Image (cartoon, helix red, strand yellow):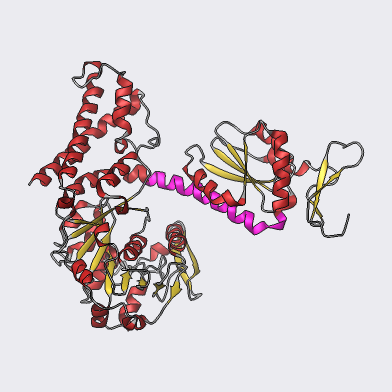
């Protein structure tokens, strides 16, 4: 073996009797066995059980030994991608791949890696991903391959977790949007308040960090010098301490979240509310509402809502109210020079204490304790998926897969954001600058109350969104949807005898045109990622129609009153 540094890979022909086989010498190493280069990868392929819908990630393809045997083994609906970190080896593999021009293999360049992972996540045929090492080139960059394959597997898993969530809650999201639409008549959209706050902003989550913060800081100073936002679960925790935040953010769609609002009825706290959220929650505080819509899935229905309410009012799906509140705070600040401090977004907890004092979760533990049940949610630390890790201070803390995922999303979305600070004393690392002295921001030069600050505290000087779009557009949208649903209902019931039957096209074509733009009728089906016109599928759609017609009628009634 040549001991000189090898910058380019070199093909080395094997001994006599194996004249058609080569190994590769690169950086003073052979990437294959000098005796039987294909044996290791063929053994790996033979031992694999590959299910339909599998994405196979080839790491270090080099000379592609084993590829024909792999393609013979994989079932339908499988895909193959390949990754090579070392550029000289990438070029070698790219050239050798031309020998397999009829094979459907995607060799991903480093420049296109992130985009390709995004495409993989949106491919509904892929249900899982497995890794196969084709050569020893993976040993040059083992961490890189581990991270990339892990990212691909997490992206695929997250897609199907989201699909399960959508199957459970998708109909509720869509129905809530219709129930909330009439409220736009006399309220506002998030874009109305963009860049409107020049005071430093504090976002309070419901984690233990909020408890620590209020032990160390004066309420009156915070109230006068900061614009404060609470997540819905933290609202009762703050008001029980005698502190009234300037705004509250809510995105939850289910009944349980109402507990966070009930003790603050008619408190006149401005409310930032998701159109997908529970409609009853926006009727409790008695203040003006500022609406936005979480883009919980890519679909035609949300595109129509975006066209109605404006592009800026459709926000990324964060999943967590803590992340959404941070996103909104960054939209509200006048410029990126205005500090935003996040407190209580811990995404972890101590054993027995999952939320800060005063939250509905904490109060429920106190109300249900007895001689036989001590206060504190001890079971949360031992539930499936929970585990112990180190917090930002290298102390043991409990988290779970969902909370850790939210923390990772926070890191990905907000890491590097200018003047965004983590003011929490405990919790997972958020990927932003930490601060333990909130008082330093009192004299930051951005705590002067301006006209726009007074507007957001009481938006009497703003024109309601419904008036701004002449509110006829809301009514027109609802009536258009109602008419279309009645047509679909008639076509599914009466078929060719329907009074809405158009003779110029087939019945299937007419139904397809009506249903494709109204995917809220089926997007929550387990197989709702693609419209089908078979009898069983259409029967399920027919069962949905009465729910949505009722919701639209209700909104139209409130809109006209």
Residue 479, quarter of picture: top left
Query: What residue lies at 20% left-to-right and 71% top-to-bottom?
Result: 451
Total numbered labels placed on residues in the image: 0
Above or below, comparing residue 42 to residue 448 in the picture: above
* Residue 330, percent from left and from top: 35, 65
Q: Is the magenta stretch mostly helix, strand or loop?
A: helix
Q: Is residue 558 left or right of residue 121?
A: left
* Residue 155, percent from left and from top: 50, 49
Residue 492, quarter of picture: top left
Query: What residue lies at 24% left-to-right and 46% top-to-bottom?
Result: 177
Q: Is residue 204 visible?
A: yes
Farthest residue to the left: give it. 561
Nearest the camera: 359 or 378?
A: 359
* Residue 371, percent from left and from top: 29, 70
Magenta stretch?
139-165
* Residue 247, percent from left and from top: 24, 67
Q: Is residue 46 left or right of residue 500?
A: right
Whether 479 is among the magenta residues is: no
Q: Can residue 370 be seen in this view?
A: no
Above or below, comparing residue 370 to residue 57 in the picture: below
Nearest the camera: 496 or 442?
A: 442
Nearest the camera: 499 or 8?
A: 8
């Amino acid at each position: 073996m040549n001991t000189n540094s090898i910058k380019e890979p070199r093909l080395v022909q094997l001994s006599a009797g194996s004249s058609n086989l080569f190994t590769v010498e690169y950086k003073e190493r052979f990437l294959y066995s000098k005796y039987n280069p294909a044996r290791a990868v063929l053994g790996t392929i033979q031992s694999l059980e590959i299910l339909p819908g599998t994405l196979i990630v080839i790491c270090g393809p080099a000379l592609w030994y084993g590829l024909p045997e792999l393609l013979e083994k994989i079932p339908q609906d499988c895909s193959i991608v390949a990754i090579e970190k070392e550029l000289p080896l990438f070029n070698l593999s790219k050239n050798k791949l031309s020998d397999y021009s009829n094979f459907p293999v995607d060799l991903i360049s480093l420049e296109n890696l992130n985009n390709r992972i995004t495409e993989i996540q949106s491919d509904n045929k892929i249900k899982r991903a497995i890794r196969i090492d084709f050569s020893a080139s993976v040993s040059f960059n083992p961490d890189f391959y581990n991270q990339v394959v892990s990212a691909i597997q997490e992206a695929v898993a997250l897609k199907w977790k989201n699909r399960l969530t959508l199957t459970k809650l998708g109909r509720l999201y869509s129905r809530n949007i219709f129930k909330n639409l009439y409220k736009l008549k006399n309220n506002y959209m998030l874009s109305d308040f963009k860049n409107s706050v020049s005071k430093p902003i504090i976002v309070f989550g419901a984690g233990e960090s909020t408890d620590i913060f209020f032990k160390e800081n004066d309420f009156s100073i915070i109230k006068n010098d900061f614009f404060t936002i609470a997540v819905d679960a933290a609202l009762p925790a703050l008001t029980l301490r005698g502190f009234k935040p300037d705004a509250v953010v809510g995105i939850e769609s289910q009944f349980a979240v109402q507990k966070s609002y009930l003790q603050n009825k008619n408190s006149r706290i401005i409310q930032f509310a998701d159109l997908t959220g529970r409609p009853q929650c926006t009727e409790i505080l008695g203040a003006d509402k500022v609406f936005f819509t979480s883009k919980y899935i890519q679909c035609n229905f949300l595109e129509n809502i975006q066209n109605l309410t404006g592009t800026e009012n459709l926000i990324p799906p964060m999943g967590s109210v803590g992340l959404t509140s941070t996103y909104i705070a960054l939209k509200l600040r006048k410029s990126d020079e205005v500090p935003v401090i996040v407190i209580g977004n811990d995404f972890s907890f101590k054993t027995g204490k999952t939320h800060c004092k005063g939250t509905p979760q904490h109060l429920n533990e106190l109300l249900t304790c007895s001689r036989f049940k001590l206060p504190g949610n001890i079971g949360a630390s031992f539930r499936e998926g929970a585990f112990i890790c180190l917090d930002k201070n290298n102390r043991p803390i409990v988290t779970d897969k969902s909370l850790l995922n939210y923390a990772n999303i926070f890191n990905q979305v907000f890491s590097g954001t200018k003047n965004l600070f983590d003011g929490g004393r405990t919790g997972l690392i958020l990927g932003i600058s930490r601060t333990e002295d909130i008082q330093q921001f009192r004299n930051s030069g951005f705590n002067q109350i301006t006209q726009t600050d007074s507007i957001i505290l009481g938006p009497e000087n703003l024109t309601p969104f419904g008036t701004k779009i002449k509110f006829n557009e809301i009514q027109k949208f609802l009536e258009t949807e109602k008419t279309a649903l009645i047509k679909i209902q008639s076509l599914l019931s009466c078929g060719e005898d329907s009074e809405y039957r158009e003779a110029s096209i087939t019945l299937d074509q007419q139904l397809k045109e009506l249903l494709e733009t109204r995917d809220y009728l089926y997007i929550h089906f387990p197989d709702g990622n693609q419209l089908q016109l078979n009898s069983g599928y259409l029967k399920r759609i027919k069962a949905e129609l009465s729910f949505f017609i009722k919701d639209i009628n209700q909104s139209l009634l409130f809109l006209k009153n």
